[in-house]
Amino acid sequence: MFNKAFAKPRFRPAINVGCLMDVSTGKYERGIHGENILNGGISGITGICARPNNFKTALAVYCMAMLRRSCHHSHAITYDSEGTLYPVGRFTAVSKNDEYLSEIDYTEDEQFAFTDISQYTGDEFFDLFRKTVNEKTKDEKSHLGTTPFVDMHGKPRTALYPSGGMIDSLSRMTVKAVEDIYDKNVIGESGMNTEAMNNGRAKKQMFNQLPQICARTGTYLFLTAHVKDVINMEMYPTDKRNLSYMKKDTVLEGVSGGFYSLPNNVWMITANKPLQNKDKMPEYPWDNSEAMKGDTDLSILTMMNIRGKNGLSGFPIDIIVSQSEGVLASLSEFHYCKDTDRFGLGGNLQNYYMELLPDVKLSRTTVRQKLNKDYRLRRAVQITAELLQLIQFHRDMDPGLLCDPKTLYDDLTAMGYNWDTLLETRGYWVFDEELKEHPRKYLSTKDLLEMRIGKYVPWWLSKEEKANLKMEKAAGASKAEDKSAA
């Protein structure tokens, strides 16, 4: 009855960004070739909050860059409400280690726009932003892209091609009505008393519009906010946290209540400390011969998804950030595995290797450079980290599908798979219209697990490669034989 009367929601897939944020926020869905596509990462509205000087902007810039990595033709704009951001430098730094992004000249790039408080107040920026992205709805067909996800009939699902936006920060964003108050009053006068009220009302009105704007236009928006302490004057204070996993007696400064209830994910950075060993040397130096005691370039951030609409909330994730390079996704994934009982690492405490790539030898002082230079190593680390997250977070997954990295490596090798080929893949999905611009084939971590039990064979393998596979050696086939024998 209702299906005939009402239109179904627009398909709005999440964009994969890596750095431990995909598996924890998404679910796998079947693709048109039977592959497992991870629908996780960044969705319509993403909030990022922390105390000052805790890399909120660095995380937002990283996510914006990863949106461009997956969607080469996406357009994005950054609005700086504080007047302190140097976006070209930030985006250039975080793009250095990506083959495609590193070729972008952000100073001249037509798809990247930046503006700030010298040009627009917050409401002026938002009004123009809204009108610009709404242009996509006037000619939807020219903005539709074909995703690898399929509908209930097995047909590819379409989605509006993504646009990106970033407001850094919402806490410091002011509106024209407040600017007028500043012009007409002197600090301390009673006329200044309505400043906060006017700002709050404008941000509430903005949030009331944001979910529909993002949903209707395929916009992925990032909002940063400052965390501050609440001074509790009550004799018997009650817990007034706006979200369950926020620290007690903290609040987000200068944002509407919509920040707590409307984003798809809200990442809170809860801790930040230099990443050094016991001798105060950098844990992962870029060049060990030049490493200095007390070097604080690398920081380790603990962040928590305090509002996850499509995944778990309240779990801590540690990521590594460089003051000079921004978020280091591969090093973060490596550290996560190493810090979790050395999951997927062989060798000893000083010299080791990834069990999915045993021919590349690593140590604490060489891993950072080798990750930067070796794509296969980055993929091995990413797959290992995602496998660990599947074990930890996807408890609804068939336990018979999961295994440790060494078992995965050995079993797929025995079946005739070439790991050099498997590691020359990409772990993020792209629109069909861009497949030629992403020459590496898609292969997810769950695909690898299903390959091991003979449930999936990559569709893009050549006939010769498929013919050489020894499917009788699949773990699932062995179990089936054991059952029939019993």
Image (cartoon, rainbow, N blue to C red):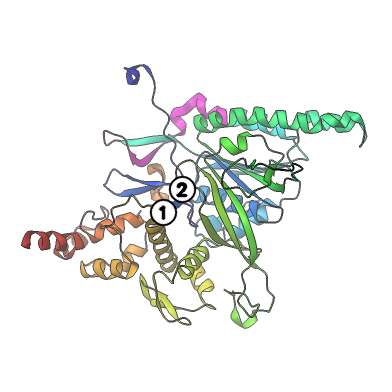
Question: In the shown orientation, is residue 179 left or right of residue 203?
Answer: right
Q: Nearer the viewer, residue 275 or 380?
A: 275
Q: Amino acid at mark 1?
A: Phe
Residue corresponding to mark 1: 393
Residue 31 appears in view: yes
Question: Is disc 2 surrounded by few (<14), some (14 to 19) or many (20+) residues within 10 Å?
Answer: some
Q: Quadrant of residue 402?
A: bottom left
Instruction: Kindly identify the residue that appears in the image at 26 percent across and 47 percent down.
Output: 34
What is the count of numbered marks? 2
Q: Nearer the viewer, residue 338 or 355?
A: 338
Residue corresponding to mark 2: 312
> Whole-Å distance between the Cαs marked 1 and 2?
8 Å
Please check the rendered image and state whether residue 261 is part of the magenta-colored stretch, yes or no: no
Q: Are marks 1 and 2 in contact (CB under 8 Å)?
A: yes
Which region shows up in magenta?
A: 133-155
Q: Amino acid at mark 2?
A: Leu
